[in-house]
Image: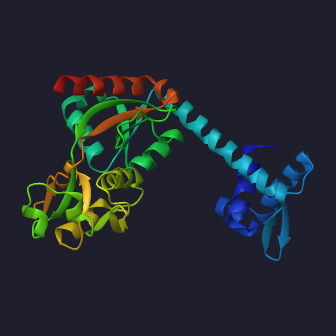
Amino acid sequence: MTLQQLKYYCMVCECHSITQAAKKFFVTQPAVTAAIRELEKEYAVRLVDKEGKSIRLTKAGEGFYQYASQMLDHAKEFDDQVHNMVKHRRNLRIGLTKSAGSAAYMEYFSNEAEKYQNVEIKVTVDSTSELIEKLRDKKLDAVLILNHSGNPMENDLKWAELKTTEMLYCVSKNHALAHEERITVPMIAKEKMVSTKHDHHKTEALRQIFLQAGYEEGPQVSWRYDQQSTALQMIAANMATGYFPAEAIRQNDGIVGKQLEGDKPVPICIAWTKDSWKQEEVQQFIKEIMKFYRAVR
């Protein structure tokens, strides 16, 4: 078994065609067919059956594809890490939430950028839930996220609070609620809201505020978008209301943010895993950003 044979096989599985797989690798069809036959011979199992011009995976073939894909992923990760080691290049993969996490990162980095002149930093911006998933999948080294519950995170994650932010109920400056000093749940119970996808942490926190006020149905989130900017445009146009961190609307003159009665400041946290902590540059980033925010409190 060779990695090249696995690459050919996985491509056939993904294309459902030996012809298409051969084109992807710029090789002949017999070369791809021979690779699959060698795998079948080595493991004494039939992996694919032909159905006209396409192929169908056998049950064993489906399981083999899963293992082969994992092995290729590990091989790529090994190759990347060895190349980085040889080149003495230091990488740091940071995940940030769209507004609060990004604002905290920029506040820190604008003051401490000189410490990372020899580090290649790759930033991913996404929702809290998506960032945590990528952290667990080892696609990120550390993430700056909101901890809406205020409770300790899952046992497989290490974390520390950096600062807090205010969650605001957001309306257009032309909305009737824009001139209210304070917003209560009864005032917004029937308002149609807009939010972003994968925001269940934020939505659940808002739902708990509704429950505490005696409203079991919770907030009416009618629209969700990939881009936070789209959601904010709808609010500014007075087409909906929303619930966002203060950082999200700081530069938007068309939106007014109001504190919701019963709401509390939300911690902005840095989270990492035991595995990511083993990297020197990750340890440095975590220790330095924690030190910075202890100093500015």
Instruction: Inspect this view and state whether residue 138 appears.
Output: no
Residue 200 against residue 217 in the figure, above or below: above
Instruction: Inspect this view and state whether residue 84 appears.
Output: yes
Residue 111 against residue 191 in the figure, above or below: above
Residue lying at 33% horizontally and 67% vertically, measured from the top left: 220
Q: Position of residue 72 (x, y in %)?
A: 66, 45
Side of 287 where 21 appears, left or right = right
The foreground one among 151 and 173 is: 151
The foreground one among 177 and 92 is: 177
Residue lying at 45% horizontally and 50% vertically, measured from the top left: 130
Give the residue furthest to the front.
214
Side of 221 where 177 appears, left or right = left
Question: Splitting the image into 4 quarters, where does residue 178 fall?
Answer: bottom left
Residue lying at 48% horizontally and 32% vertically, measured from the top left: 157
Residue 215 against residue 129 in the figure, above or below: below
Colour scheme of the picture: rainbow
The foreground one among 269 and 89 is: 269
Question: Splitting the image into 4 quarters, where does residue 185 fall?
Answer: bottom left
Q: Position of residue 44 (x, y in %)?
A: 93, 49
Question: Splitting the image into 4 quarters, where does residue 252 fall?
Answer: bottom left
Give the residue furthest to the bottom.
52
Q: Position of residue 102 (x, y in %)?
A: 28, 44
The foreground one among 164 and 230 is: 164
